[in-house]
Image (spheres, coloured by chain):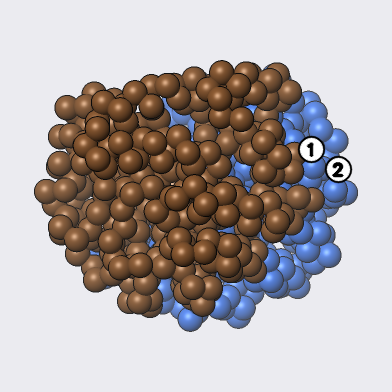
Chain colours: A brown, B blue
Amino acid sequence: MTCTFTGLSGFPLTPLKDESVDEAAFAGLVERSAAAGVDSITALGSTGSYAYLTPAERACVANLAVEHAGDTPVLVGVGALRTSHVLTNAEAAQAAGAAGLLLAPMSYQPLTDHDVFELYRAVTVATDLPVIVYDNPGTTHFEFTHELYARIAELPGIASIKIPGVPADPEAAREHVGAIRAVIPEHVTIGVSGDASAATGLNAGCEAWCSVIGGTLPEPALAITRAAQEGRAADAFAESERLAPLWDLFTKFGGSLRVVAAIAEQLALAPRGCLPLPIQPLSDDQRARISGVLDSLVLN
Amino acid sequence: MTCTFTGLSGFPLTPLKDESVDEAAFAGLVERSAAAGVDSITALGSTGSYAYLTPAERACVANLAVEHAGDTPVLVGVGALRTSHVLTNAEAAQAAGAAGLLLAPMSYQPLTDHDVFELYRAVTVATDLPVIVYDNPGTTHFEFTHELYARIAELPGIASIKIPGVPADPEAAREHVGAIRAVIPEHVTIGVSGDASAATGLNAGCEAWCSVIGGTLPEPALAITRAAQEGRAADAFAESERLAPLWDLFTKFGGSLRVVAAIAEQLALAPRGCLPLPIQPLSDDQRARISGVLDSLVLN
């Protein structure tokens, strides 16, 4: 992979079984996304439960992802609360054959802009791999400013910035993405996350989609991505609208992770109860609702 | 220790030196608090950087704390993002000779009340030690309701609930503490944290103070605690007011941890730059301000 990070990146779950990584299930998810034709696979994103896994589990998952992705480039999430642990994860990811690193500024004590800039500096100094800035305030509780995006994006090795969901209004989304684009170098791409707003983000100029469903249900994610890439904005939006019942479940059932885990379990892609505790599985009632939505969207 | 958790608990830093625990500096902080006469020492609280340390480092710190605390009971923070890791930490703390466990619901993915209740249930089932509920939303990003306090407090083995800072107004603080007291069993004590509001919290009926300065500057913390315990509410409040310039620094310089680390460094109780990266040390200007405050308060 060059330093250009674009298109659809599928974020597979890291399914657990009896507190250990279910290696076969994980390999299956990676193969499924690669076979569908995603542009990259990001192992150990938030969807991949990176924050909950030991360094040894993470190295194992990075290796499995590269082994099973074929020619599809694999990005690996290396975030950790402590900088030295991030560097260890980065080394393991590089050894596994990762094409790039995804790094979120995980926090326990609230972080300053200075802390976060120095974190990215330390990692870009330590690795030759392209680094994707992972802005996910719902989990990291760190709020990037555009000024900080700009400072970090100028570090050599920064390839992309993954931003949280964009405004729902297309014009507002375009202004939002344009304002970020205006302050970062041209070679640094912008990736959108928040699956419900991905079509709007891609239509507004984001070059990549870091996709939760892309790791479990890659086809509809590809339909949205290819439409947006080919300038068929209305088609991208229509496919996303078709999936609105799914996005609604993300909101109602405590976030995309719990819902996508339940979907993977339902489709026998992961064992029942595949998320790390303390994250409790959804209830039988909630699973029935999910099942109904999958049926109605013909996603099963 | 019985299941009654009361009085002053000093929270020592876990100073690092070149990315490893500075065992001598940590032992010195524990001995200093024990010699001053604190009622307990809580190793591996937020002030002790528990969230940043490996399981092996945490086991080492728990052992050192018990070794150097003499007759003073030692509580050990066992929080982790994953329940199985919490249980491992709890086992290590019990093996080290801890008198109780402190547990915060650390989060990466947002947690539900059901997740958090089941976390506490799992830990109380797995250990014979008293467990202190550690409500610290500024770091965990989980918000307890009084209803959840009540449900968790009824689990066998729950000894105390450590609440965040209380309202500044004494009457509002009394109502706040009373409302919690009304929904939890009598044997479960309430501990206040947030050093600036500790005098108000103790005067309002909190039975314990989980104290950041108690781990580094135990004397003024003891003066406040003993005054409140002896019914000298005005004296407790006056001593806290005297320390207002210190509380102001906590607010101005990004929280108590960075300031207390700088104080410990200044007093040669910890090596320079003792916090885990990415947490950057305070600047020389900030350190000069802290030094001035220490001089004016005769805390050096």
Q: Position of residue B230 (x, y in %)?
A: 65, 39
The chain containing the residue under callout 1 comes to: B
Q: Position of residue A229 (x, y in %)?
A: 26, 42
Residue drawn where x is 58% and y is 32% of the image: A259
Q: What residue type is labelled 1?
A: Arg
Residue B267 in the image: above or below residue A61: below
Residue drawn where x is 48% and y is 81% of the image: B18
Q: What element carries label 1?
A: helix
Which of the labelled discs sits on residue B125, or is there none?
A: 2
The chain containing the residue under callout 2 comes to: B
Which of the labelled discs sits on residue B121, or is there none?
A: 1
Most foreground residue, A29 or B239: A29
Q: Is mark 2 on a helix, strand or loop?
A: helix
| Residue B80 at least partly seen | no
Q: Name the quadrant containing residue A222.
A: top left
Q: Name the quadrant containing residue B179.
A: top right
Residue drawn where x is 21% and y is 37% of the image: A231
Q: Position of residue A103 (x, y in %)?
A: 41, 59
Residue drawn where x is 38% and y is 27% of the image: A240
